[in-house]
Amino acid sequence: MNTKLFLAIGLAACAGNDAAGVDTTSTAEFCGASAATGCTTMYMCLTDAERMQRHLPPTEPECERSLKASCETTLDACPSATHVYAPATAQTCLDQMSTATCSDAGQAWLDAKACNDVCERTGGSFGVSWRFDPAYACSDIQIAAVRVVSSGGGQTFVDDFRCDALTGVTDVVPVGDYNVHIELYDANNVKKWSSPATMHTIDDDVVEVAIVVPVQ
């Protein structure tokens, strides 16, 4: 083992002790700890040229300030309709960072996988599109509205759109698996057709669902 790698492992072990005492319910403390661990490893392991290539500041303290500020800016936007800050995942992130070696120094978050999920996904939407086969306009077959029905996890969510829009994005639904189908309604709100349901998983802000409506 070369001296540089040995020193990096030693530093990571020390960082691990600090990580165990970090209050990850505070985004500021998490960001400070992750910046300190990341910069310690990068400035120990990377050459000057490698740090320049990654646009890192000249000194380790500047690196810590920069990464902490960037982390806080990112997490400030985390609480939303589709994401939430996850303190337990943040702790796992710090634990994984603390075991990083020089081979991880050039990777984002020192290649700690959990760090990518600190902003935990809580929901998303379905982007549903529909078309008729053969091609018809909605007015040609007297369809005025399309209802998107998403059922999963013991809940059913309904979103209504004008047929001639040919697409629509549902309201946010919780993360999970859903059976999604559409229903076609005429101007008198009489249901004229319902598509077979297909399974889709909410794992992105918008999950695309394309439905072909056969016209007899």
Image (cartoon, rainbow, N blue to C red):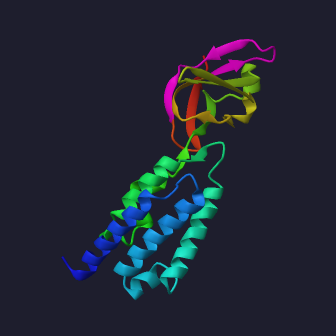
Instruction: Name the residue nearer the viewer: 177 or 57.
Output: 57
Q: Does residue 112 appear anywhere in the picture?
A: no
Residue 197 within the segment the image draws in magenta:
yes
Against 18, residue 79 (above or below) is: above
Q: Quadrant of residue 151?
A: top right
Q: Is residue 63 left or right of residue 172?
A: left
Give the residue at x 37% y 58%: 96
Give the residue at x 74% y 21%: 143
Across and down, in percent, residue 27 comes to 58, 57
Q: Quadrant of the C terminus?
A: top right
Across and down, in percent, residue 56 comes to 50, 80
Across and down, in percent, residue 65 comes to 57, 75
Q: Is residue 49 left or right of residue 172?
A: left
Q: Which residues are magenta?
A: 182-201
Q: Quadrant of residue 41?
A: bottom left
Instruction: Name the residue nearer the viewer: 28 or 72.
Output: 28
Q: Quadrant of the N terminus?
A: bottom left
Q: Does residue 103 appear anywhere in the picture?
A: yes
